[in-house]
Amino acid sequence: AGVDGRALVSLRRLDLTTAVQTVADRPNTAAKTLALLKQFTGWAVARGLLEHDPLGGVTAKRLGLQAYEPRARVLTEDELRALWQRTDPDGHVFKFALLTACRIGEVLQWAPEQVVGGVWTIPQTKSGRPHTLPLTVQAKALLPLPSPRPIYVSMAGRLKRSGIAWTAHDLRRTAATLQPSTGSRAMRPTRTTSMPSEARVPRKPSRPFGGTSRRDCRNTWCPTPFWFWTPSRSPRTAK
């Protein structure tokens, strides 16, 4: 991109914006590249490595980049059936990720000592905070996860090389999207996805509905091949 091997202080705004423009044909990649570069140059200024931010005031709109379009891909019923028939280690991990609606990076860091009494405590999530998640019957049946587990990058590469159209994060979005169709009346998606409640639904105490206990909700059979806690309001896809 014309910036490889260059000293940080020698980089001009034109150098960095040109690097972004080289991937302008892929709008989401270009937007993410610009965001990462702006984050980096801002950090460099804060650390005293740069006197001025070369990307200050630069936005995707000003560069003429297409608007970022969040990915909305969810697995089809045929893809879910195919996943459930897999018996390889990767398939095992993917099924656990789907059942828990967790990020694949959190699943890959699973350890036996994190599960106590059927409750999985994730030490650190994307928000930087721990998250506790009661495991469903089928999720517990998948434990322990295969070890050693692959790193995220290698798993993503294998998915692409095998011709599979979905990504690991699409499993999380699929879980959040399918929750209302499972036939179970229970908890909101924040319980499974670890997202702050204020980021997803209006503030209101989360509780089971119709007198259904949390234990009953976790063990309710659903028409899809997994149990979920179902949100009380219309779903929003996981990000």
Image (cartoon, grey):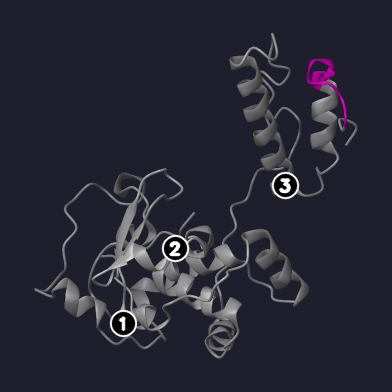
- Hey, what amino acid is under mark 2? Cys
Residue 41 falls in image quadrant? top right
Q: Position of residue 80 (x, y in %)?
A: 53, 83
Q: Residue furthest top?
A: 51
Residue 102's disc is 2
Whether residue 41 is in magenta: the answer is: no
Q: Residue at x 35, y 79 (%)?
A: 140
User: Which amino acid type corresponds to the residue marked 1 in the rendered image?
Assistant: Val
**What's the residue at 56%, 62% (across, down)?**
169
Q: Which residues are magenta?
A: 5-13
Disc 2 packing (10 Å; few <14; some 14–19; many ≥20) = many
Viewed as shown, does residue 188 lie left or right of 141? left
Residue 200, above or below 148:
above
Query: Which mark is on residue 176?
Result: none
Question: What is the distance, in whole Å, between disc 1 and disc 3 at their CAs?
Answer: 39 Å
User: Mark on residue 29?
Assistant: 3
Q: Give residue 118's quadrant in the image.
A: bottom left
Q: Which residue is mark 1?
A: 137
Q: Secondary structure at mark 3?
A: helix
The image position of residue 117, as x and y in percent, is: 23, 71
Tell which tag, 3 or 2, sits nearer the viewer.
2
Question: Image quadrant for the N terminus?
Answer: top right
Label 1 crowd (10 A; few <14 / some 14-19 / many >=20): some
In the image, is residue 51 above or below residue 156? above
**CA gap, disc 2 and disc 1:** 16 Å
The residue sitting at 53% across, 80% down in the picture is 92
